Image (tube, rainbow, N blue to C red):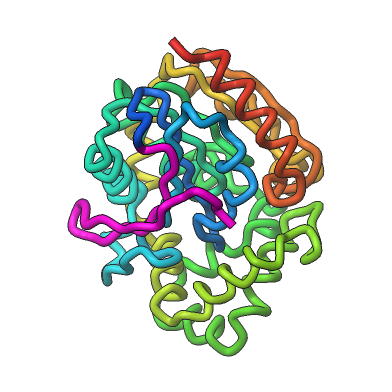
Amino acid sequence: MFDDFDLSNAKVNGVEINFRIKNNHNASENAILFLHGFPQTHAMWAGIADKFPDNYPIICSDLRGYGNSEKPKGVENFSFRHMAEDQFQLMSHLGFKKFHIVGHDRGGRVAHRMALDETDRIKTITLMDIVPTELLLSELTTQVAQSYYHWLFLAQQSPLPEKLIAADPDYFYESCLLGWGGANLDSFDSEKLTQYRKSWNNADTIRAMCDDYRAAIHFDWALDKEDRNRCLQIPACVMWGKTGAMARHFDVPATWSKNFLNIEKKPMDGGHFFPDQHPQETVSALVSFIINNIN
């Protein structure tokens, strides 16, 4: 995986962030930052990020708490704002002032927070299979709560979810991969699954991922309420899996209409994990959107 990428880490914002980078010699404002979601790592972007033309510097990082990035203790350290600042400082460390950002799942929520906090640094934003955090939590329905029960389960007080998950991490996290529509284990590359399993069988990762969801309830919800009426002019691409749980419960692009003035809508075959199921189609959609918005 990740041919021609360099694997590295950097101490930024007080934590070590693990990342891969390609084409760093082509320093420009066309750099693209890829952010993964739960319960994955940056490995999800293999076969996608490496298919971009060579004139695009590509960075794929592990969010704090995930993969091989540092896992600080304390729920307060896992807000999307902290995660966003990690990535801003990483990109500054690498020499990129402005850049494109692509985020799936939790990575999409971090990307949205980045766009809110330092709008001028984001050239385009791509959000994959999410609705706004504030909307999801403030208007939680029985149907959504049943599909996305993990939001409430993982947010329970420590150590309840940690102890239950630790009994069989593969069973729990693989149920998450399969539970949001349109996927089976064969949909996931075996090398990527090996990386995911290695990560989520680490007790510190289990704890950190729980703290991520606790922070969403205790910190991010309020932060997003403060910004609910902000509409950004950044070109935005909203992608979603046509057979996923989000598509069953929401008109996904419509949920972002108050947040972004200019939205390109891209429904994708597959479910929540459509990048794993259909990597080439994902590449084509991303390249088309980003190239059309280079200025």
Residue that appears at 40% across and 46% down: 221
What range of the chain is rendered magenta?
A: 1-24
Q: Is residue 112 above or below residue 274?
A: above
Magenta-colored stretch includes residue 158: no
Residue that appears at 68% across and 54% down: 142
Instruction: Residue 217: tell me if it is visible.
Output: no
Residue lying at the far top in this picture: please name it: 295
Place of residue 73 in the rendered image (x, y in percent of width and height, measured from the top left): 27, 71
Which residue is nearer to you in this view: 95 or 53?
A: 53
Which residue is nearer to you in this view: 63 or 154?
A: 63
Dividing the picture into quadrants, the one containing residue 209 is bottom left
Residue lying at the far left in this picture: please name it: 14
Place of residue 32 in the rendered image (x, y in percent of width and height, measured from the top left): 45, 34
Place of residue 211 in the rendered image (x, y in percent of width and height, measured from the top left): 39, 66
Quadrant of the snapshot with the C terminus? top left
Dividing the picture into quadrants, the one containing residue 173 is bottom right
Place of residue 255 in the rendered image (x, y in percent of width and height, measured from the top left): 59, 29
Q: Is residue 161 left or right of residue 95?
A: right
Q: Is residue 107 left or right of residue 96?
A: right
Residue that appears at 50% across and 68% down: 154
Which residue is nearer to you in this view: 28 or 80?
A: 28
Instruction: Residue 263: tell me if it is visible.
Output: yes
Q: Is residue 276 above or below residue 239?
A: below
Magenta residues, dominant SS class: strand
Q: Is residue 93 above or below residue 56?
A: below
Quadrant of the snapshot with the N terminus? bottom right
Residue lying at the far bottom in this picture: please name it: 167
Q: Is residue 99 left or right of residue 76?
A: right
Dividing the picture into quadrants, the one containing residue 187 is bottom right
